[in-house]
Image (cartoon, rainbow, N blue to C red):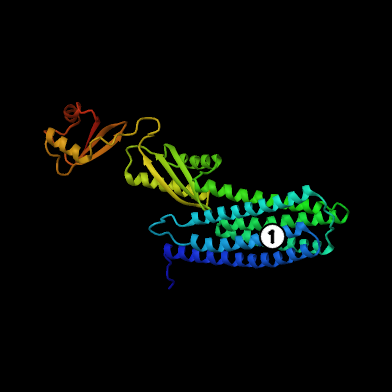
Amino acid sequence: MEESISPAQQHRENLASEMKAASRVTIIGMILDAVLGVIKVISGALFNSQALIVDGIHSFSDVASDLVVLGVMKVSRQEPDQDHPYGHQRIETFGTLVLGSILIAVGAALAWDNTLRLLEGGIDTVPGWPVLVAAAVSVGSKEWIYRYTRHVGLRIRSDLIIANAWHSRTDAFSSVVVLVSTAGAMLGMVWLDVLAAVVIAAIIIHIGWKFTWDSVKELVDTGLSREDTEMLKTIARDTDGVRDVHELRSRRMGHDILLDIHLVVRPEISVSEGHQIGMRVVAGMRDALDNIRSINFHIDAENDEDQPVTSERLPSREEIRSILAAQLGALPHHSRLRLHYLKNRVHLELFLEEPEADTPFNAANIKARLGDYPWFGSVRVWVAGP
């Protein structure tokens, strides 16, 4: 007989599996980056290619970023705890921010140094043919690790791993630039090698800025796009029982989406029916976007954006029961009182189990006794049949 796995246990197993996959691909990429970095720096120094040396430094920056990824992934994939009820995925976002900042700093330093060399002139060294071989090996290797890493990142839904994959692809792009510039330098345009180094540095800065800016937007709780927001509102409005939708708010945590939404339903329905309507909205939204992690829905009996918010000073159930008792006597033993707080008034529904000819609890009498209270809206009395 098979043992059922609890959701919490399944979540732990998923986290462990994701962490293992992320660590494996990152370590493979780190070893590859280190080997390529050594090959490119040595080849660039021996065969007169400043562009290849810069490309090799880029590869070593990949090694540093891989170390950041390994550390951040270990922390960010921990289970939610009392201090972090939504989990630790924002640490992953912070790691992506650090990674982007490293890229910007490395790229800026390399761009500055090689721009000065280009402006000073006097460049007369021609790169040797082994530079072409080293660059070609780098292009093939980095394109392979990019595809592998991106596949893993999409599978485990990790923006940090996907960002690291693109970091690898910038190395492939820069190696293509080395190939072209080296061929041009061999044909007599010696300055192309240094110009290529500046272009590679600019590519590094651009990718680093993209990672950094995307991370900042997430850390300040930037919501979904207007198109996705409208799509989710449409799904909610089309759900049976929903009269209107307002205050749809969204934010991201890593690759996951967190939503808060207010649903306007008919005021006379039960609490359980309102909750069931909300659950149908949740199901529809999850079908549309599979990375929605949490949807917090609020059931409204009226759209409080179009009118004043219901005052918290309106009387509570116990206060209203006390007023009724003072005005009309104690409620019948088997009666039920239902209250509707709408448009800053309280509307009463009284359900009586047995009809009584002389009961003071009839609609006209209650209205007459409560009509002077500013909070009173209306009253209905329902009497069970024989």
Residue 279, x across and y down, in percent: 41, 48
Residue with the mark numbered 1: 57
- Identify which residue, 241 or 254, lies in the foreground: 254
Q: Is residue 4 left or right of residue 166?
A: left
Q: Amino acid at mark 1?
A: Ile
- Identify which residue, 9 or 40, lies in the foreground: 40
Residue at horizontal 56 percent and vertical 64 percent from the top: 70
Q: Quadrant of residue 375?
A: top left
Q: Quadrant of residue 176?
A: bottom right
Residue at horizontal 80 percent and vertical 54 percent from the top: 193
Residue 370 visible in rendering: yes
Q: Residue furthest bottom?
A: 1
- Above or below residue 158? Residue 234 is above
Q: Residue furthest right?
A: 187
- Above or below residue 211? Residue 313 is above
Residue at horizontal 33 percent and vertical 47 percent from the top: 272
Q: Residues within 10 Å of mark 1 (few under 14, many from 20)?
A: many
Residue 356, x across and y down, in percent: 13, 36
- Determine whether the residue tagged by mark 1 lies in a helix, strand or loop: helix
Residue 316, x across and y down, in percent: 23, 39
